[in-house]
Image (cartoon, coloured by chain):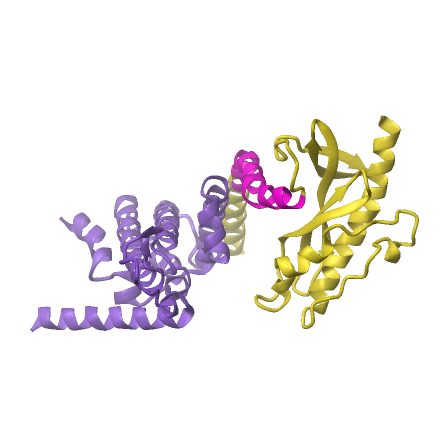
Chain colours: A yellow, B purple
Amino acid sequence: MKEAAHMIVVLVIICTVCGVALSGFREMTAERIENQVLMNVQGPRVNKVLEGSQNDLIADRKVIKIDGQEVLLFMGKKDGKPWAIAYETLGKGFGGDLKVMVGYDIENDKLTGIQIVSHKETPGVGSKVTEDQFTQRFKGIEIDLKAEPEKRLSKKIDAISGATYSSQGVYEAIGKSLQLYMAIKKQDLSTK
Amino acid sequence: MKLLRTFTKGLWEELPPFRLVLGLCPVLAVTKSAETGLGMGLAVIFVLTCSNVLVSCLRNVIPRKVRIASYIVIIASFVVMVELASQAFFYKIYESLGIFIPLIVVNCIILGRAEAFASRNGIIPSALDGLGIGLGFTMSLTVLGAIREILGAGTLFGTQVMWSSFRPFTFMVEAPGAFISLGVLLALMNAFSKTQQS
C-alpha cells in the first residue's frame, strides 16, 4: 500500500511539473509560431489566391467575428480600395481535416481562387487536390448568393478520379466558406 | 580520464546507428539531405542530454516499478519543447522533419541511455554520456545525409558541389537509397574495425 502510494505520488508530481513547464513554454513560443505559420504557410497561399493585390496581404490581416466564431480575414487592395478577401475553412477529407483558403472578388462576387493550406490525404492520390491542375479549376467562378447551398457556384467542378473523398472535402470547405462569405458581406455592408 | 571516455565512447565504439544499430527509423527517414540530418541530430542531442541529466537527478526518487513511465514523461516533455522551438525558430527544418520530431519520444537510443546509463550514474557522467552519444548520432546522420544529398541531388547543404553536367542519382534520396547507403557504410566500418583489430 505504501509502495503504491509512493509510485502514484512520484508519477503525479513528475507529470504535473512537466505539464506546467510545457504549457509555459507553449505560451512563450505561441506568438512566434503564429508568425512563422503566417510567413511560411498562409502567406504564400494568400499571395496566390489574391494575386494582383497591391498591398502587403499579411500585414493587412485582421480577425473578425462572424456568428460567434473568429475568422482570420486577409484583404486584398487595389489602388487603396479593398477588392478581394480570403480566409480558411475546414472540410473533412479522406485522412483528416483539409484546410482550404478561398479567395473572393467582393466587387463581382467571384472566386479568385483556392489553395489547400494543410491536409492529411494519401500522398500521390488524395494529395492531388493540392495541385494547380485541380485548384485552378475554381478560379473565376461566379457565385449566386441567392441560390440554395449546393447551387451557389455557377459551375460544377469535377472531382479528381481516385480522390473522391478528398475532392469532397474541398467542396465541403468551400461550402462552409460560402456560408461565411454571405455573413461577411452582410456585416461589411451594414458597417459601411 | 574516465569522464572523457564516457564522452568519447559515443563517437566511435558505441556510435549509435553504426555500432549499436539503434534508432534506425529516423536515420533512414530523415537523411535525405545533410541539413535535415543535422537538424534531427541537434534535436536528439538536446533531448538526450536534458533527459539524461533529469533522469540522473531523479534516479533515487523514482520507484523502480514506474521508472519507464517516468522516463517517457520526461523525454516526451523535452521532445515537445524541441518541437515548439523548431516551429518557432527553424520553420523550414520543422517542415522537412515533420512527424520525425515527435517520434524522437520513441527513439530507443534515448530511452536506452536513460535506462542503461543515466539511472545508474551521477549527473555529470550522464550529461557527458548524452552529449557524446548525441554527437555521434548527429555525425552519423549528417554524414549519411551528405552522401545521399551529394549523390542524389548533387548538392551539399543546399549548395551545388558536383560538376554542372552531373546527373543526380535520385534513387539515393529515396527510401531504398537510405537502406543501401546505410548498409554500405556499416560494411565499410566493420571492415575498418577488423583491420584495426588484426
Q: Nearer the viewer, residue B196 or B75?
A: B196
Quadrant location, the C terminus of chain B: bottom left
Is residue A124 visible in the rendered image? The answer is: yes
Residue at position x 42%, y 69% in the image: B175
* Residue A116 picture location, percent across and down: 65, 53
Left or right, B167 with reference to B66: left
Left or right, A93 with reference to A47: right
Q: Main secondary structure of the magenta part?
A: helix
* Residue B62 picture location, percent across and down: 43, 51
Q: Is residue A41 magenta?
A: yes
Left or right, B110 with reference to A145: left
Residue at position x 50%, y 53% in the image: A7
* Residue B157 picture location, percent across and down: 33, 51
In the depicted structure, whether residue B156 falls above or below residue B189: above
In the depicted structure, whether residue A186 falls above or below residue B146: above
Q: Is residue A135 magenta?
A: no
Is residue A67 visible in the rendered image? The answer is: no
Q: Nearer the viewer, residue A50 or B78?
A: A50
* Residue A73 picture location, percent across and down: 71, 37
Stretch in magenta: A22-49
Q: Nearer the viewer, residue A5 or A31?
A: A31
Left or right, A3 with reference to A77: left
Residue at position x 82%, y 41% in the image: A108
